[in-house]
């Protein structure tokens, strides 16, 4: 049986009057430029760092998946502790793990287009149209990506219906009519009640600065330039970069912004469409959130729940993988497949 097209998915949701939600993964960014936004490209960047220990680790585990390598490092550290081995060895392994995580941040930053205006108007508007399908119909957008492509598109096209939960607080004495208004940085929380854009694993422009979660913004200087300054000041983005599903969830639950986004996913209703997200072995926490939404809840005397999911697949292997999950009854709602190649995201 032929797969549905993306347009058929949208038409089906409209016909059934379902609230449409969207989950995008690395494939969203790779659809823009597969050479830049891929784990292979990130690995090439690591190679250029000329760090012998990291290169050996990648070679030993035979993978270019950063999460896999970091998990191996964590497992090795636990074995060292269990056997009461050399403290210097444990320190060396822990240092390698930390270095790899920071290198991943650097890699993603370095491998972006120089700035938002490198993306053509046509590509940016096409993507904005794709995103508006969900935001204009009271749906949510969830991203597991760390890069700033999604943020760039939302801001450049001034999509009024998008709310990421960040806003400014007035910090001067409002009771003094002669005082000049003074506003804070973009803090998360002011508009979270109407938030419909969620970065499930964090993103490069979002920083935890202690009391507040703040968002870096374009103000005449480009975002990547400002992010670079924060990194040099030893401020790091909210960023889930390692581990299996359980470890990722642990990281998420220890950050109030990430936790809020994850709970939002756990409470969506209607249907959800995925693009560029393949529900891999490290994504069980995302499946758990979807299944929680599928159980439903009572809201203002009405029972609402997630009824179905439409998963975009690129290749036959993708299709086989998702069908194996369906046969294993991993998902607790109806699952449909569509041909992700028919979704015109950027061009």
Image (cartoon, rainbow, N blue to C red):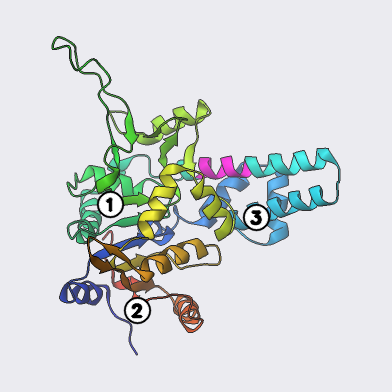
> Tag 3's secondary structure?
helix
Question: Nearest the camera: 218 or 327?
Answer: 327
> Tag 1's secondary structure?
loop
Which residue is the extreme one toward the left? 177
Which residue shows up at 75% across the image and 51% down it?
A: 78
Which residue shows up at 34% across the image and 33% down it?
A: 187
The answer to whether one can see residue 65 in this image is no
Nearer the N terminus, badge 1 or badge 2? 1
Image-based side of 207 in relation to 157, left or right: right
Q: CA distance from mark 1 to mark 2?
A: 24 Å
Which residue is label 2 attached to?
Answer: 336
Nearer the N terminus, badge 2 or badge 3? 3
Which residue is label 3 attached to?
Answer: 71
Question: Nearest the camera: 4 or 29?
Answer: 4
Q: Position of residue 147 (x, y in %)?
A: 41, 47
Tag of residue 1: none
Closest to the camera, between mark 1 and mark 2, is: 1
């Amino acid at each position: 049986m032929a797969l549905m097209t993306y347009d058929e998915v949208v038409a089906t949701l409209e016909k059934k009057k379902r609230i449409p939600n969207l989950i995008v993964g690395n494939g969203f960014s790779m659809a823009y430029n597969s050479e830049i936004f891929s784990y292979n490209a990130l690995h090439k960047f690591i190679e250029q760092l000329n760090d012998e220990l990291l290169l050996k680790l990648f070679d030993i585990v035979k993978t270019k998946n950063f999460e896999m390598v970091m998990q191996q490092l964590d497992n090795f550290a636990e074995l060292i502790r269990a056997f009461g081995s050399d403290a210097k060895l444990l320190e060396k392994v822990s240092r390698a793990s930390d270095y790899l995580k920071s290198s991943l941040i650097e890699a993603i930053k370095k491998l972006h287009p120089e700035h938002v205006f490198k993306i053509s108007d046509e590509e940016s508007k096409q993507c904005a149209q794709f995103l508006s399908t969900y935001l204009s119909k009271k749906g949510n957008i969830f991203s597991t990506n760390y890069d700033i492509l999604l943020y760039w598109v939302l801001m450049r096209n001034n999509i009024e219906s998008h709310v990421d939960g960040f806003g400014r607080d007035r910090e001067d004495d409002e009771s003094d009519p002669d005082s000049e208004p003074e506003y804070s940085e973009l803090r998360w929380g002011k508009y979270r009640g109407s938030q419909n854009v969620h970065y499930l694993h964090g993103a490069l422009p979002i920083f935890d600065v202690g009391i507040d979660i703040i968002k870096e913004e374009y103000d005449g200087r480009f975002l990547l330039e400002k992010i670079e300054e924060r990194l040099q000041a030893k401020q790091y983005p909210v960023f889930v970069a390692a581990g299996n599903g359980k470890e990722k969830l642990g990281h998420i639950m220890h950050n109030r912004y990430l936790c809020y986004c994850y709970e939002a996913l756990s409470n969506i209703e209607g249907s959800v469409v995925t693009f560029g997200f393949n529900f891999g072995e490290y994504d069980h926490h995302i499946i758990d959130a979807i299944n929680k939404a599928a159980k439903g809840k009572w809201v203002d005397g009405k029972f609402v729940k997630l009824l179905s999911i439409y998963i975009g697949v690129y290749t036959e292997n993708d299709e086989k993988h998702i069908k194996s999950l369906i046969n294993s009854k991993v998902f607790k709602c109806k699952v449909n497949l569509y041909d992700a190649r028919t979704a015109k995201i950027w061009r």
